[in-house]
Image: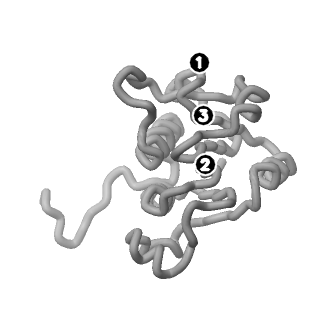
């Protein structure tokens, strides 16, 4: 079982950088769907503080259709659309404990996921509870971290270190 974060047409390189760092820390595969609102160059990666970019398993897709074709060819996958419009909570018990690969698809920072695509797949939509009267949406990198860590919690943090000893441990 592998977890995947999928960014649909990300606009802000700092968000993508934060999500890439989370992917590196959690052994999560990152998928980026073009077009981007920035160029993936060494200069932009350094500016976003991505000195760990080489530690992230990244797959690029030319568009949403290419991504969907990619996962359609795979066995045992679950696609989750993360959106404020969903009726199901991302933290429902038992959502992620099967042997499937879980793909969490996040929309653009400014417009989210395409409406027609979401209307075709409402059963795949998950929501992070929030007060919609105060904010329009959560920050993309925060939302990705919230969702992937809930997934990992339900999977009992498989493959991650719950405790690590450091040479200069501040608590020892």
Label 3: how many residues lie within 10 Å, few (<14), some (14-19) or many (20+)?
A: some
Mark 3–mark 2 CB contact (< 8 Å): no
Residue bearing mark 1: 87
Q: Position of residue 103 (x, y in %)?
A: 66, 44
- Taking 143 as reference, is 66 above or below it? below
Label 1: how many residues lie within 10 Å, few (<14), some (14-19) or many (20+)?
A: some
Give the residue displayed 36% in from the left and 50% down from the top: 162
**Of label 3 and label 2, which has the lower sequence position?**
2
Q: Is residue 58 left or right of residue 149?
A: right
Nearer mark to the viewer, of 1 and 2? 1
**Of label 1 and label 3, which has the lower sequence position?**
1
Q: Position of residue 124 (x, y in %)?
A: 69, 29
**Total number of numbered discs in the rendering:** 3
Q: Which mark is residue 113?
A: none
Indicate how the structure is coloured in the image. one colour
Residue bearing mark 2: 3
Q: State how far apart marks 1 and 3 are (Cα).
A: 21 Å
Element type at mark 1: loop
Residue bearing mark 3: 97
Give the residue displayed 68% in from the left and 45% down from the top: 101
């Amino acid at each position: 079982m592998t977890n995947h974060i999928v960014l649909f047409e990300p606009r802000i390189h700092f968000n993508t950088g934060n999500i890439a760092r989370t992917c590196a820390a959690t052994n999560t595969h990152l998928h980026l769907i073009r077009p981007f609102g920035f160029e993936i160059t060494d200069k932009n990666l350094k500016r976003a503080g991505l000195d760990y970019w080489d530690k992230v398993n990244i797959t690029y897709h030319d568009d949403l259709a290419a991504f969907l074709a990619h996962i359609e060819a795979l066995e045992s996958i679950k696609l989750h659309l993360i959106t404020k419009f969903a009726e199901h909570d991302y933290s429902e018990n038992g959502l992620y404990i099967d042997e499937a690969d879980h793909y969490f698809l996040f929309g653009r920072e400014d417009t989210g996921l395409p409406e027609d695509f979401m209307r075709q797949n409402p059963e795949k939509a998950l929501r992070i509870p929030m007060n919609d009267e105060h904010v329009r949406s959560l920050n993309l990198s925060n939302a990705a971290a919230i969702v992937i860590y809930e997934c990992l919690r339900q999977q009992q943090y498989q493959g991650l270190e719950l405790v690590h000893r450091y040479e200069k441990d501040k608590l020892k």
